[in-house]
Amino acid sequence: MAGTGAQTDGGTDASILDVAERLVQTRGFNGFSYADIAQELSVTKASLHYHYPGKADLGRALIDRYAERFADSLAAIGAAEPSPSRALDAYANLYADVFAAHRMCLCGMLAAEYETLPDPMQEAIRGFFDVNEAWLAEVLTRGRRDGSLAFAGSSRETARGIVAGLEGAMLVGRATDGPAGFRAAARRLVRRLAGVQTG
Amino acid sequence: MAGTGAQTDGGTDASILDVAERLVQTRGFNGFSYADIAQELSVTKASLHYHYPGKADLGRALIDRYAERFADSLAAIGAAEPSPSRALDAYANLYADVFAAHRMCLCGMLAAEYETLPDPMQEAIRGFFDVNEAWLAEVLTRGRRDGSLAFAGSSRETARGIVAGLEGAMLVGRATDGPAGFRAAARRLVRRLAGVQTG
DNA sequence: GTCTATAGGCAGATAGAC
DNA sequence: GTCTATCTGCCTATAGAC
């Protein structure tokens, strides 16, 4: 359930991040303001600036927390799912959970606005995708070795295709899909790209 | 070469759309202002409001023109490429051309900001994806019938996966890829999802 | 840590002269 | 059609009291 922004503790910083995270995932980094957060938390904008002096600081903190949670989820999948094909299903489900919460992946959303973002945020976004691709590449390599997966080309480029497919499915699905079919579509996409062998 | 925003004629309206299109494709609809366009064209903001009274009007005009161009490109591919697999390669190249121009697909970008956009723009964005999926579905159906393509599930859901894959590849690629590998990656993705039969 | 108050700038948009 | 001038409102951000 990574990336859906469950309230962590009761800390003020975390509450701010929770609200900001949801706003970025639904409206984009350029589509919300400190005023939006302040109103929702019934505090003043000045108070928010105490915790995160500038919007860039807030943005960087958002990505770091999101990436950390996502990495935890990947580690949990790795521990719980020794089968590569099952690990891929679980990976697709991470995205389906975000979509079901009527959100876009935080870093997918920020990738769209990439050119308008400060350097520290751009750097963190690249890091997020790199971690995802590296984790997937490892799963893919393992699956091809044990015969449960069959795909042409390198694990890394196949991993990149899977990330792209899932991010794109969320992006387009926001405009066209209901949440119903997304989970199945995401699984289908990943299995197809990874060449999951039936039986 | 649809979607790269080549100057159509010398009309003022078209010039405004050309600049605005590039700004949306690189920075997003919420990432530019009338002032940006005015500066680039050396006119005043008031002059722009004469041509497009509100930003929503400008946005709708942008999508309509973009969708029209894209539809023309699809028709041209249909006329020039009787082979389904070659038509799919040409389709992937449409996206690669946009990416090579250091742009995101206009409607992919707007899909990210979907929740913040006025109804007329949302409607036009859905129309764009629907036309793309319908065109692809027809190609896929034809290819499966003649044996050149092999994929599980419906043509329509496979078409949706291809659009998602290409949009996502552009989205993520802006943050991670150089323009070099994108064309090959896009072709690989489409061929894999459509089950292009070798030989 | 949160507040009031405010600065300084930019957003989208309009009126009216030319 | 394009201009100058202006409006209103929101934006990010800061100073300083409590």
Image (cartoon, coloured by chain):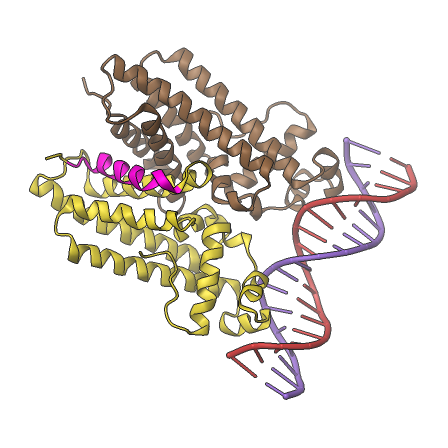
Chain colours: A yellow, B brown, C red, D purple
Nearer-the-camera pick, D17 or B80: D17
- Left or right: where A54 falls relative to A198: right
Nearer-the-camera pick, B97 or B68: B68
Specify whether residue B56 is painted magenta: no
B131 vs B37: above or below: above
Which residue is situated farthest in the front direction here? A180
Number of disc labels: 0
Which residue is situated farthest in the left direction here? A146
B126 vs D17: above or below: above
Question: Is residue B173 at least partly visible in the picture?
Answer: no
Task: Label the magenta part by its dominant secondary structure.
Answer: helix
C9 vs B75: above or below: below
Q: Residue at x 23, y 34 (%)?
A: A192
Q: Residue at x 45, y 52 (%)?
A: A25
When asked about the image quadrant of residue A158, the answer is top left
- Left or right: where A2 falls relative to B118: left
Which percent across, then down, holds residue A157?
25, 40
- Left or right: where B136 falls relative to A48: left
Which percent across, then down, holds residue A6?
37, 62
- Left or right: where A26 falls relative to A84: right
Q: Residue at x 23, y 49 (%)?
A: A90
Highlighted range, magenta: A179-196
Which percent across, then down, holds residue B134?
41, 23
When asked about the image quadrant of residue A21, the answer is bottom left
Q: Quadrant of the C terminus of chain B?
A: top left
